[in-house]
Image: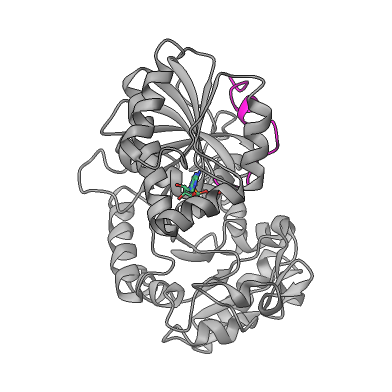
């Protein structure tokens, strides 16, 4: 392994892993801190450990990140990347700074850069201020986030509240001059005792330059965007061969299915289109608010229908029906009921030979991954931006798995997904 990554949430980890695959690194995502056994960190150019630490107390996040770091180093990682959200989601007692401090100490880093910019998604940094599209972070809606309200767009100030180190800025005028100028500025900040550096970035060209400037850093931190420049560093030094098969997965066999628990507008549209293309079961959760009974309905329905052509099983419902169930059971209980049912359905599908499974919904995906005992995901080609096919391994049979957050994907996503090799 060359690059070891630690991400503070699951979808962010997949996003980072996909970025690295696109840039020619074979990449595996590991769910949670890997175990100590030799199998726990699979062979790959890059490994991304997906934590669930974004809103965890700093002490827990630090402990998990350090444990992940030890496993990655033991597996040969030459550089560690700490990945957080491109909107720097955290609170003054947040954990981006504390985790970075702990990793800097462990890795003996003299200066560490922080760059959450992701221009393709409208996240840019200018004079240390984070913008979302044309708005400052603090006027982008993120100031009202239920868990991590971001009321200050000045990342130098935000990070200063979270780290024991001095925080400096590598401004746009320097970044725009390229890797050499960035490297010089970082060294100057370290000499001044400012060991944390917010780095401006407005375009992908800046991100590539920042990545190049950090080639010899033991640690860097940011959103998935700044990782774009890292694979080239390893190719330049001959450590990473040129690969045109970084996204290759083992061949698939067996049956195919889609399982939908997302009630987002995008997913409802995808179900609407897929109905005409594949056998579809829409569970009526309101009529049968019982997880075991819903799973039994699905199991009875799938008998004789499974094949290499996908079937679709959905619990998804439009807002008025979701609201009706929530009014009846309470919001949490309603969600948990459907997640339990769909996790059981996923288990039944795999037990009956499904080996290509597409899951729609973030929480739904979490429940399915847990039910199937998935530990690692080898990242393949993207179906639509941000949603790759993966090869999942763990305690159950290996299978091809695609995990889609609710709002991702075009209207033909479910159909298109199975047209890929
Ligand atoms: P998204 O990625 O779109 O947010 P999630 O899977 O994270 O999707 O969340 C959708 C939630 O809605 C899950 O908790 C799921 O169990 C729940 N859900 C699915 N179908 C229904 C339904 N018919 N009524 C109420 N809740 C539902």
Q: Quadrant of the N terminus?
A: top left
Give the answer, above or below, for where 216 lies relative to 43: below
Q: Main secondary structure of the magenta part?
A: loop
- The residue at 45%/73% (across/down) is 96
Q: How many marks?
A: 0
In reply to whether residue 410 is colored magenta, the answer given is: yes
Pinpoint residue 371: horizontal percent, then vertical percent. Answer: 31, 39
In the image, farthest residue toward the right:
134
Identify the magenta region: 405-421
Residue 326: give x, y in percent of width and height. Answer: 47, 55
Q: Quarter-wise, where is residue 78 in the image?
A: bottom left
Whether residue 43 can be seen here: no
Residue 171: % across, % down: 70, 78
Q: Nearer the viewer, residue 234 or 260?
A: 260
Looking at the image, which is closer to me, 175 or 378?
Answer: 378
Left or right: residue 404 compared with residue 342: right
Which residue is at a point 73% across and 58% down the rendered structure image? 205
- Residue drawn 63% across and 45% down? 408
- For the point 71% across and 78% down, the residue is 139
Left or right, 19 with reference to 112: right
Look at the image and name its color scheme: one colour
Residue 352 visible, this orientation: yes
Q: Is residue 151 magenta?
A: no
Which residue is outermost to the top?
304
């Amino acid at each position: 392994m060359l690059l070891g990554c630690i991400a503070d949430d699951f979808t962010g980890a997949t996003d980072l892993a996909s970025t690295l695959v696109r840039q020619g690194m074979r990449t595996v995502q590991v769910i949670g801190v890997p175990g100590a056994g030799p199998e726990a960190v699979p062979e790959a150019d890059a490994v991304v450990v997906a934590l669930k630490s974004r809103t965890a107390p700093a002490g827990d996040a630090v402990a998990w990140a350090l444990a992940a770091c030890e496993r990655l180093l033991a597996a040969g990682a030459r550089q560690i990347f700490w990945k957080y959200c491109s909107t720097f989601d955290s609170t003054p007692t947040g954990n981006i700074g504390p985790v970075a401090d702990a990793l800097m100490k462990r890795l003996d880093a003299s200066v560490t850069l922080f760059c959450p910019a992701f221009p393709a998604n409208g996240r840019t940094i200018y004079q240390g201020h984070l913008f979302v599209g044309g708005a400052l972070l603090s006027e982008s809606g993120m100031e009202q986030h239920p868990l991590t309200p971001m009321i200050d767009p000045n990342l130098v100030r935000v990070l200063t509240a979270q780290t024991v180190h001095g925080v400096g800025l590598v401004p746009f005028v320097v970044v725009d001059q390229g890797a050499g100028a960035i490297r010089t500025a970082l060294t100057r900040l370290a000499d001044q005792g400012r060991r944390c550096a917010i780095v401006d970035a407005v375009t992908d060209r800046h991100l590539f330059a920042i990545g190049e400037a950090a080639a010899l850093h033991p640690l860097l931190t940011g959103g998935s965007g700044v990782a774009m420049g890292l694979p080239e560093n390893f190719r330049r030094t001959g450590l990473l061969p040129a690969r045109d098969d970084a996204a290759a997965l083992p061949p698939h066999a067996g049956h195919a299915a889609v399982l939908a628990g997302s009630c987002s507008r995008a997913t409802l549209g995808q179900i609407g289109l897929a109905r005409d293309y594949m056998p579809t079961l829409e569970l009526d959760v309101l009529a049968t608010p019982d997880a075991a009974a819903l799973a039994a309905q699905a199991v009875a329905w799938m008998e004789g229908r499974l094949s290499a052509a996908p079937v679709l099983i959905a619990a998804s419902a439009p807002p008025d029906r979701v609201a009706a169930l929530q009014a009846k059971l309470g919001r949490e209980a309603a969600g948990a009921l459907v997640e339990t049912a769909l996790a059981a359905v996923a288990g039944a599908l795999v037990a009956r030979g499904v080996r290509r499974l597409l899951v729609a919904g973030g929480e739904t995906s979490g429940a399915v991954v847990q039910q199937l005992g998935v530990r690692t995901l080898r990242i393949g080609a993207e179906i639509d931006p941000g949603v790759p096919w993966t090869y999942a391994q763990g305690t159950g049979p290996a299978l091809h798995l695609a995990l889609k957050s609710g709002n991702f994907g075009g209207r033909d996503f479910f159909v298109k997904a199975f047209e890929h090799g």
